[in-house]
Image: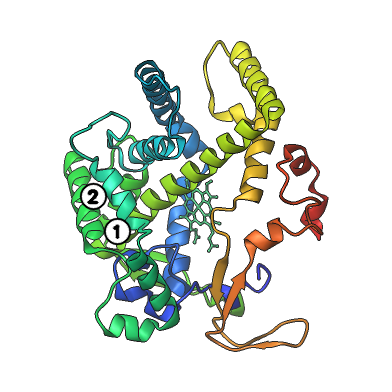
Amino acid sequence: MAKDFYYFNNREVADHTHKETVTQNLFFTGGNRWKVLRQNLTALFSSAKLKNMFYLIENCAILLDKVIAEDLKSNKSNVIEIKSLLAKYTMDCIGSCAFGVETGTLVRTDTQKNPFTIMGEKIFDVSNFGALKMISRAMWPATFYGLGLKWFNDDIVTFFNKLLKGVFANRSHKQSPRNDFVDFILSWKQNNYLMGDSINNFKTGLKNTITLEVNDDLLVAQCVLFFAAGFETTATTTSFVFYELAKHPKAQARVIEEVSDYFDRHNGKIEYECINEMPYLQACVDETLRLYPVLGVLTREVAESYSLPTGLLLEKGDRIHIPVYHIHHNPYNFPEPDEFRPERTQDLHWYTF
Ligand code: HEM
């Protein structure tokens, strides 16, 4: 798939992603739209940019520390519901790093639910109706959109549209020194279009260029993706890390020792490169991602007929499901796959299977 990427560049329901705002983002789309967006967003994830934003994450972490300390003081049972706390924390990080706003999710408001938390719940709608919409769209996309249905609630689009307009206005529609996600897409808006390579170049070897019109829908769609991808994935993974460490006291003690040593060496200050000095913690995160992959199945739609090395012919539009969870839990790749064993991720023999 990596070698012949052109044939597998489409995600599920590729022909219908233009039919609602949210699915016009990088995660759901394919073809030229994906290629141009991807090319224009890649620079946002350079090490230098991420390093520059690190202090924002540090500030959110300091606040998280305070919230935990206060919670433990007022909470006699000494129990904290970690998943929702971490979701608030990661939402705060993404709000700050991507949009330059303080979400306030970590600050307690008992009377009113935070609007970012509400959006998070709307995007990851776990109700029966949400599941029904997701499945019907995947199975009968033409009928689904023909009936005027949408996977994502309109409130999400309205909220992020307003958020973006507010941030643009705050920055007087000029790029700020933050150089963050909002600055990036502000520059897109000012140019009215994006340029990038055609997806066909992968096949033809040519260097054709494509132009993509920039409108509010396109901007809002990327905004929703960054918010959703940024908070839910990291909150789920870190809460599973805590869960596994709680069940494995020896691993927990080793992580605590490694983290304490790090702080001793760095006068109590955390730095961007910290993870390089904490290999065991990294191994715990990797092992958690193996046990609980955030996306257990990845889907692609074949862009053009393709013959697999076995001779099996895949037709245009055929859907491929990549069983990530199964690969991670196959004893051939990982002996005793259900065991949490951080040490195994340091031995990457399985990587070449
Ligand atoms: C533990 C954390 C994370 C995990 C496990 C994770 C996992 C994934 C996976 C498996 C995909 C590929 C989906 C596919 O091939 O169909 C993906 C795509 C993506 N993720 Fe994440 N992600 C994480 C954090 C983040 C964060 C923090 C951001 C941004 C702030 C982000 C932004 C994206 C974007 C933009 C894509 C689409 C890339 C593309 O289509 O080119 N992710 N993520």
**Of 81 and 152, the residue lying toward us:** 81
Where is residue 127? Give x, y as percent: 35, 61
User: Which dot marks residue 313?
Assistant: none
Residue 267 visible in the displayed image: yes
Name the side, left or right, on which 4 lies relative to 101: right
Name the side, left or right, on which 257 lies relative to 185: right
> At x 49% / y 33%, what residue is drawn?
51
**Of 108 and 103, the residue lying toward us:** 108
Residue type at mark 2? Leu
Residue type at mark 1? Leu
Image quarter of residue 329:
bottom right
Residue under pointer 1: 219
24 in relation to 174, above or below: below
Residue 277 visible in the displayed image: no
Cα distance, mark 2 to mark 1?
8 Å
What kind of colouring is applied to the model shown?
rainbow
- Is ligand 1 closer than 8 angstroms to the Cβ of mark 2? no
**Disc 2 secondary structure class:** helix
> At x 39% / y 65%, what residue is drawn?
195
Determine contact: label 2, label 1, CB under 8 Å. Answer: yes
Where is residue 252? Give x, y as percent: 65, 27
> At x 56% / y 41%, what residue is drawn?
240
Label 2 CA crowd tier, 10 Å (few <14, some 14–19, many 20+): some
Name the side, left or right, on which 325 lies relative to 17: right
Name the side, left or right, on which 5 lies relative to 135: right
Residue under pointer 2: 164
In this view, the residue farthest toward the front is: 77
**Of 151 and 19, the residue lying toward us:** 151
